[in-house]
Amino acid sequence: MRIPLQVLVRGPPRYIWACVLCSLNGLLFGMDTGIIGPVTDMTDFKASFGGSQNATIHGLIVSSILIPAALASFFAGHLADRLGRPKGISIGVLVFGIGAAVEAGAVSLGMFIAGRVIEGLGEGLFLGNLVVLICEISPTSTRGPLTTGPQLMITLGLVVGFFTCYGTSALVSSFSWRTPFIVLSGLSVTFSAASYLYLPESPRWLNLHGRHKEAAVTWDRLEVSHAEREKAELQSEPLQTAEGITTSAAPDVKQESPVHKILDIFAKDVRTRTVLAVFLMGMQQLSGIDGVLYYAPLLFQQAGLASSQASFFASGVSALVIFTVTIPGLIYADGWGRRASIIYGGVGLGTVMFLIGGLYAGGAIHGTYGAGRWIVIVCIYIFAIIFSLTWAVAVKVYTAEIQPQHTRASATTLAHSSNWIFNFLVALTTPILLAKSSFGAYFLFGGCCFLTSFVGAIFMHETKGKSLGEIEEAFKQGTVGKSVLGAFRGPRAKLTV
């Protein structure tokens, strides 16, 4: 992505600062993901809540945040459509912070799990709407890199979470595991207030609700050029009410706020995109990425790093690697394309998972010595790198930008709900699968990666460099995919769905 000279001279336009502030909220999700694995492996945590936790209890503690997040995410888009994007984000972040505070002060395992449930409700409310807001305030030329901002902050949160635990694990008290949640809660309250006070409303949302003068003022404040905003307004699709009546969104006509039902995302003209988004976000988790992130200390111990400190440090390094490689993923998001990233990324992820599974199945891992152990450790890093460069960036951006304006928030947050549900399944079953079989989980995740590449090759429509209006028009024409052979080269084949 080339940065115009005038931007370097007078600083970035305000819409970039707005996207940065919005993206910062992703840090919270990353921190929680980075914290929970090491915390549940700490000696003082086990002493506080019982040291005889089996694999099922371990999985339940980690995954208890996810089903509430899935339920909240299902309604998060509707909330953001009613109240506006910034308010929906701010409320969710505040609820998340309250949950983290409950975890920090937990005196029983039940109270700790209750805190994770509250945290999950907040997480579901705000996380999906981050990409929606950025997608709607970004010009076409910079939408790809800017909408990957939350993912970059998530990876930074992983680094902060892992190394916070690495530092506090030396404390000989319950503050070894309470301190990370105290920090997380404090950051959540701060980000909630900042989002409420300083995040701008989406001009597209304002136009959709008939507040055209406010939308024009907001575009000015965001310093989006007239050419870009005119492109957005002229190419935005007609609004369709629940009764199927099509209305104009012309800026000189005052409209009542449109009322859309949650199930409008399954209307005939949009359901294909809704299902595709739900599938991609669910399979993103079935790649096994959060099994790697949540249980990195366990995976490294299984591979031969017997010391808890050594596995914590290796986990922190993996988070640092993920953050580092996400930066080029952000910069070149538009150059690589969403479709190619998902197809080729899936092939790479599946290959690595099958290699790890094959090493365990073939008995190549022998205790704390041998080349097999180091191959597995390196493969875990390679898996994280490939995911961060491809699926981590492309899937979330793609699921938001293919949706029409009137269902974008609801469809995107439903897709995130799918992500949470499969995240729950992965988080709950990974320690159980690893306890039962050293290789079964890797073959399962690898197979899901290959399946996603195949489906993407057939049904995905490339969106890089296209305005939201152009993407909408392409889907309306029915050209929603390519043939399997054409996924890698050759002309597009029209498939009507």
Image (tube, helix red, strand yellow):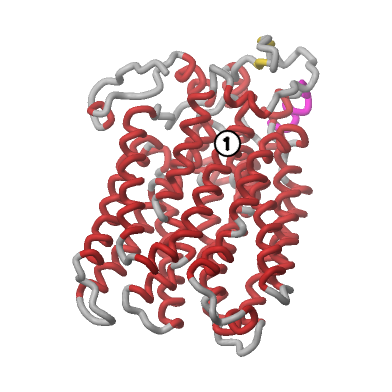
Tell me which secondary structure the magenta stretch mostly adopts. Answer: helix
Which corner quadrant of the image does residue 269 belong to?
top right
Which corner quadrant of the image does residue 219 belong to?
top right
For residue 126, side relative to residue 161 (left or right): right
Residue furthest toward the bottom?
172
**What residue is at 33 percent from the left and 40 percent from the top?**
451
Quadrant (top left/top right/bottom left/bottom right) for the C terminus: top left
Q: Nearer the viewer, residue 67 or 397?
A: 67
**What residue is at 75 percent from the left and 24 percent from the top?**
209
- Amino acid type, label 1: Thr
For residue 92, side relative to residue 331 (left or right): right
Q: Where is residue 80 shown, x and y percent of the image?
A: 71, 37
Task: Indicate whether 334 appears above or below 467.
Answer: below
Q: Where is residue 189 shown, x and y percent of the image?
A: 75, 60
Residue under circle 1?
A: 412
Q: Where is residue 115 shown, x and y percent of the image?
A: 70, 64
**What residue is at 43 percent from the left and 54 percent from the top?**
326
Residue range corresponding to the magenta coloring = 210-219
For residue 330, side relative to residue 84 (left or right): left
Quadrant (top left/top right/bottom left/bottom right) for the N terminus: top left
**What residue is at 51 percent from the left and 66 percent from the top?**
56
